[in-house]
Amino acid sequence: MSGVGSRTLLALALQLAALLALSAALLGASWLDARSKPRVLVVVDRSQSVPRAAADKAIADVMQAAKADRGLDVQVLEFAGRPAPPSPRASEPAADLDPSVTNIEAALEAALTAHAKTPFASAVVISDGLETVGDTARALGAVREARLPVQWIPVGREPPQTRIEEVVVPDRVRLGQKVRLTVRLAGQLGSTFRVKASMRTAGGDTQSSSAPSSGAGLATIEFDARSVGAVLVDVALEDPVSGRVLDAMPDAAVIDVAPRAGILYAQGATGALARSLAQGGWSLNVVPAARLDAHADGLDRYQAVVLEDVAVSDAGPRFWSALVDAVDRRGLGLMVLGGERSFARGGYRESALESVLPVLSEPAALDQPVAIMFAVDKSGSMGQGSGGVDRFALAQRAVIETARGLTARDSLGLVVFDVLPRVLIPLGPSSVGTLALERDWQVRPNGGTKLAPALEAAIGELERANASRRMLIVVTDGFVDGAPLEPLRARLDRSRIEMIALAVGPDADVSALERLAGVGAGLVLRVNEAAELPVVMRAGVERRRARIERGTITVEQRQALPFAPGTWKDWPAVAAHAVTRSRPDAAVAVQSQRGEPLIAFRRSGLGRVVAVTSGLGPWTPQWLSWREWPQLAGGLAAWVSGTARGGALGLSVSDLPGGLQIEVDVPSAAGQPDAGNLSVAVDTPAAKGRLLGTEHIGPGRLRAVLPDAGAGLYTFVASTPLGTQRQLHLRRHRGESESWGVNPELSAWTTAGLVSAWTPGELAKRRGVNEEPTPVDRTLIGLALALFLSGVLVDRTRLTLAGVRETLGRMRMRAR
Amino acid sequence: MSPMWLLGLLLVPVIRWLHRGGRHRRTVFVSSLSLWRGSAISTPAAGERRPPDPAWRHRALMTALIFVALAEPQLPLQRSRITLWVDDSLSMQTRETQGTRLVQVLGQARRLLSEADNQDVEVRSLGDPWHSLGALGDGTVAALSASAGLREPAPPPGALLRRDRSHWLLTDGADAALLDWPGGRHPDRVIEVASVTRNAGLERISARRSASDPERIDLLLKITNGGTDVETREVVIGTDAGEAARSTQRIEPGTSALVSASIGATTRVRVRLEPGDALVEDDSIDLDLTPLRRRRVATDSKCPVALVAAVAAHPALAVAPDNAADVDTTLDCGTGGSADGRATIRVVADRVPTRLAGPLQWSSSVAESSRIRLDAEALQAASALHARHADVVLLAVGDAPVIVRRAGAPSLIETSLDFGSMGITRGPEVPLLVNLMFESVLGEHLLDRIAIVDRGPTSARVAPVVRGGAAAQSLPGRLPAASGVTPAADDLPLLRSWTWPTLAIALAVLLWEVVSLGRQWVRLSGNAGAALE
């Protein structure tokens, strides 16, 4: 054969090879161009219920099958609660997939979206099929409609032989208390297991402890409540020998650690209860009764208020209004302790405070005759005044108005004094005395002030009286002279004379008057403005006549105290108590032998109120040393500090597949709820203080929805002008942590043709059902082109060494 | 498309050059060089350039075709495959002059589709996008009309917006969200029908037992003006016993009014608005109140008074004799067990009540907001309960379970609590415990339950808020009432790859080349044989 013929033969061979390469490309063969390879999507379940090792092995199987089948291009789409974008290989564990949830529907929709962009020959799902969110069957139907064949590799975990059945915990403890968890096991309980639990706070404080299980499969573990706030509990079951974790329940429970009860303690008396509670670890803010006004706006900080022998006059109307409102609407606890300045004597009758108490103060004991001597200072300073009315004139009016309130069985007398006393009206029947008072006293203010002679004169008058009660009412605006007060005080006590001193103006010698009046037996009333003198005197006398039962009063328990079941038999006697009567809706637990309430309870609105008419101090000296005293004092404080769940609002949280639903019920007493007046804020595992919009969804009910809520701790705070309600909610996906095996529905899906069993050889067999053709392999086309051009070159050129030299030589010649 | 591959077309002149002809040359045999001077050549061909080898043409064509194929040419596709996305919201039931909006818009689509032949049309609703309704026929129209308003429509899922199809949206434009398609896509064509712009509708009705009188039902209605004018409607509330209440509401466009009412106990309530309007479907609403009915509890005569009183006082429970048949659950205090497989609460008392020591403990399966606040020290137990396998200890005091949900069916709750001793506290503990146990045994919320029918915030909206797929949104009152067709978008042409046809032609050319070369080789082989002979 000639050279030409052999070149033609070689060219022909090359062109035939090009023909083959081109035909192969057109027939869908792939060589090096990845785009032309059939693509397979592996959808991998990374939720907690699917063991990672088994899933990884399944991925490896698919990869191997793909490699064996023309080197298919495999994309991996991992998912749990949400899907990740497809990638060429499986990634490291990713928390942002929300592994506590299985949402196969979302994963299949993501697969369909990827399929719509670039078609896949088939998809392989690696999962246990146990979805916790979504509708897998519906999604599989959509996949079938998209003509994407699905093979399923079932991967589930084996149920543990022994597992954690349940964790029983308190939902709320106080700081410093012991927290006790009880873990119940199920399954094979033949041997002893170790149950390990840990408590962790948001601040990072973690405590761990463990305990062996009993033969009954119970383990009890204790912790200390060390910090305030929500603590999460994780529980794990271990083999005590190998330490292998047999089962785990992360986020098993949440416990709310509350601060020690905050109590505002207004102290008008000795404060025996305050000392006892403080020693018992209660958190008290003890304030003098006269400073209560400063706390009118701060009651929200407290769980309870204790008023120990506090008079209504100790605080202004604003405080009492705020207190009553907080009790009724917010659930503030209130404990009122009796004393010389409380209940009727404290001006409780028909006051705002009385509206929440379980007892009503009885009216003044007018059936008990009283002898009253008025001693009125007529010194020169009492002539001061304004608007033509001086202190003395006002004192005159006060005496007259007070006298008018006396009954016919009472008696009265009048002494006026400067440096010397003068008995204007000797002690006699009140009707005669009142008429005499209303005449001109024939007295003008002048001179100095000497109190002792006037008091001796008045006391002398009272000592002659036969009345069961004797009262001395002194009105003065000056200094008490230097005369010794003790003998006078002793004489007053001896003669059982109760003294009421009205200290008028800023110069009045209050401390001396208080020493003279004595503790308990007398009363000093400050009168800053002389114009108030008539009102203060009249009210002071009326309150002084309020009934207080004194003596050795036997105590009996009528029914159980709300904090202590049963009855205590040996209640010590009390020395005195304010006489009251119980409201119809109150519970009287302890009473006097005469049936008068000593300890009574009532719920007022949302708050708990207890009244102890005997107080817990000077009138109950034997109680303070009684063996039941700690339980009584602590129980009373605990009861009033406890608030009914719901507070001003009812707040409930429900788990929905796609999020959390929060419903707030506003009490009907507050009228129709207004979404504008309600704010619902939530601390989620990812963000704090997120505000949720609410909608008026039903009668008295508002609803908020928190979509896309993952697992974890949520703290909701609902606030209205009525108050604030806090609610913890631990969103768990128990189905994830407590499910084993494979969804039995999988066989139904297979029967329905939604999925097919895993068959490696058929990984890309159904290729071609897609409407869009696979790209032709560029590398094969390029090969065909190269072969073709080579054939052309072979055919058209005589590539010999001599020829090349000759050509190069000619080119050089031309260049010259 | 990869246009860089087209640079390969520069090889075409090279192929042409390879097949160049050159001048004709002739061999003249002479015996002596001196004779060379006297030799002559025929003038016609002497020095003339021969033509190139004709093979260059198909070789150049082949090369060009392959480079074009490598560039993967794409040409606009004839839009023959169409998906009709039909808005099946309630507002599509609005009566226009020629039937409902749904019927009108489907009719318009049908007319447009009839203008072109050979179209592959599939219909999908926005309420159920994954289910193809097939071609646009009478059956499809009927199916869509029957299901309109039953499901909340949403923009089509991205997975179904295939690029080889045209996507048309058939809507009334009342819900702007339906135009917010995923991935920045938007409809290729929007067919919109909306001329009616006035409507007031009942969006929601909810009911619960009155807190002050459990024998009455509190209702809350939400009436929405989804049109562009102020509307005044008479709200008529009816029960089985007849009309129960009536009020007049004036509602500004785009706003809602809440109407509260209280009615006597009944099983069903129906509310209607008068006068009716073009959207009849939202002028009335029915609410089934049977979920609020009292569950009858067969109560053991041995039960403590406080417990029976708490059951009687529960707004969702009613005490029935222990031998009653038509009851929902049984409260057993020692006389017998559950009858007929009924759910049962069993109060176990086999010893003298004793006070329990320790704090209250709850099962982690009890939702945090369902846990009630109790004074643990006030609780006494009259028995010792033991939890068995698969039981759930709902409440324990210290180590002692006091309320246990037994595993298996029928549902059984056992409690060892002594309700007799708790009654004296006069607090809410007993009623709350009773509620907890009955909710657990019946598996449903009993206290403060609400019955509700909610059509959604867009159900009454009939005035279009967007026109023709435009991005701009406007207030309902500012939009003209009109219907129309937005022409198909041309910024996203549907393309088809021409790689395969190009390569097929190249294959044919290559076959030609192979055949030519084969013939050339045969010819050359023949010539060589003849020469040898």
Image (spheres, coloured by chain):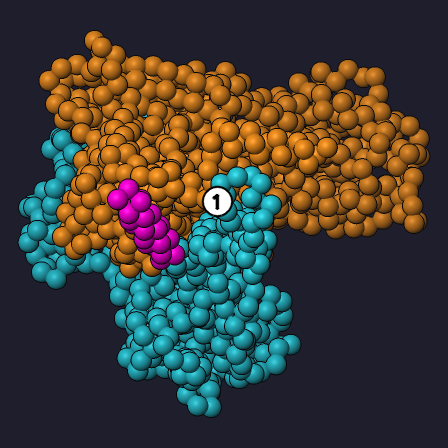
| Percent coordinates x, y for residue A193 in the rendering | 20, 15
Does A474 appear above or below A618? below
Does A523 appear above or below B12? above
Task: Looking at this view, name the residue that lies furthest to the bottom.
Answer: B97
Please give the residue where the numbered disc 1 appears in the rendered image: B29
Residue at x 25% of width, y 28% of height: A57
Q: Nearer the viewer, residue A148 or B500?
A: B500
Tell which subunit mark 1 falls on.
Answer: B
**Would residue A240 appear left or right of A578 to someone viewing this image?**
left
Q: Secondary structure at mark 1?
A: loop
Image quadrant in which the C terminus of chain A is located:
top right
Picture colour for chain B: cyan
Identity, as a three-letter code, of the amino acid under mark 1: Phe
| Percent coordinates x, y for residue A812 in the rendering | 66, 31
- Is residue A210 visible in the rendered structure shown here? yes
Picture colour for chain A: orange
Residue A774 magenta: no
Residue at x 56% of width, y 39% of height: B33
**Would residue A171 appear left or right of A281 to someone viewing this image?**
left
Q: Nearer the viewer, residue A697 or A394?
A: A697
